Amino acid sequence: MSGSWAEISDERRGLFLFLGVLPILNGLFDTLSYAATLALTQRGLRAGWGAVLYGLADFAVAALLFLALGATLVVVIAGMNVLSGVVLLDLVQVIGGLTDWRQYWWLYAMVFSTLLPTCVHFLIAALSLSAIVSQDKRLVIWGWIGRREADNLAAIGGALALGLLWFLAVALPVAAIGLLIWFGFGWLEWAAEGYLHWLARIALAVGGLD
């Protein structure tokens, strides 16, 4: 088996890996992420303020899938390296160089694609925070919108008020997350280094690292 792989050029091995194997694995985890997001979003839409909790649950699921995808890629590639008897992808170089996102942007893009449905769900869940405004004030806004054809001032006021309400509902959580990332950057860096070390141990256990 190794002889047949050894006779294949590096370019064709790369095409097999990057156009055949990796897209299938990535598509599988993307599908799982979409399924989880759809299920939690449907429940969240009927939960009022509980939509925020469903959004957080979706984020937790997406984070687990994100970590699992990285581990799965390492296991599959390391296993293929062992079974084929040739180096389809140098995991030592890849894992060691992941801190340079410019060199491995394609890998980051592939792995982070599992988070896209969660980002959409986050926006939907964030809009539920508009309920922080009392119902009587929201009814005033809806009344302005309802009179938009007969009253120009009501049309302008309704559009501005609704736009501001939705903007704040999304912007405030995003700002809070941004602050957490900013102040917790050191912890995130430590977690990323630990994750890469864990991936290296997985590859070593499978036999993909010398």
Image (spheres, helix red, strand yellow):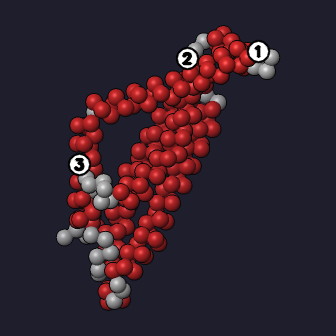
Number of marks:
3
Residue 46 rendering spot, x and y as whole percentages: 64, 30
Does the rendering let one see residue 94? yes
The residue tagged with tag 1: helix, strand or loop? loop
Residue 63 rendering spot, x and y as whole percentages: 41, 44
> Does residue 94 sit above or below 158 in this rendering?
below
Circles 3 and 1: CB atoms closer than 8 Å: no
Local packing at callout 3 (Cα closer than 10 Å; few below 14, some 14-19, many 20+) is some
As measured in the structure, the alpha-carbon distance from the residue carrying label 2 to the one carrying label 3 is 39 Å
> Does residue 200 sit above or below 195 in this rendering?
below
The residue tagged with tag 3: helix, strand or loop? helix
Given residues 127 and 32, the one toward you in this image is 127
Where's the N terminus, which quadrant? bottom left
Residue 171 rendering spot, x and y as whole percentages: 47, 27
Q: Amino acid at mark 3?
A: Glu
The residue where tag 3 is placed is 193
Q: Residue at x 37, y 50 (%)?
A: 67
Where's the C terminus, which quadrant? bottom left
The residue where tag 1 is placed is 151
Q: Residue at x 37, y 62 (%)?
A: 73
Q: Amino acid at mark 2?
A: Ile
Q: Amino acid at mark 1?
A: Asp
The residue where tag 2 is placed is 132
> Does residue 42 sit above or below 106 in this rendering?
above
In the rendered image, which quarter is residue 153 located in? Answer: top right
Local packing at callout 1 (Cα closer than 10 Å; few below 14, some 14-19, many 20+) is few
As measured in the structure, the alpha-carbon distance from the residue carrying label 3 to the one carrying label 1 is 59 Å
Does the rendering let one see residue 49? no
Q: Residue at x 46, y 39 (%)?
A: 59
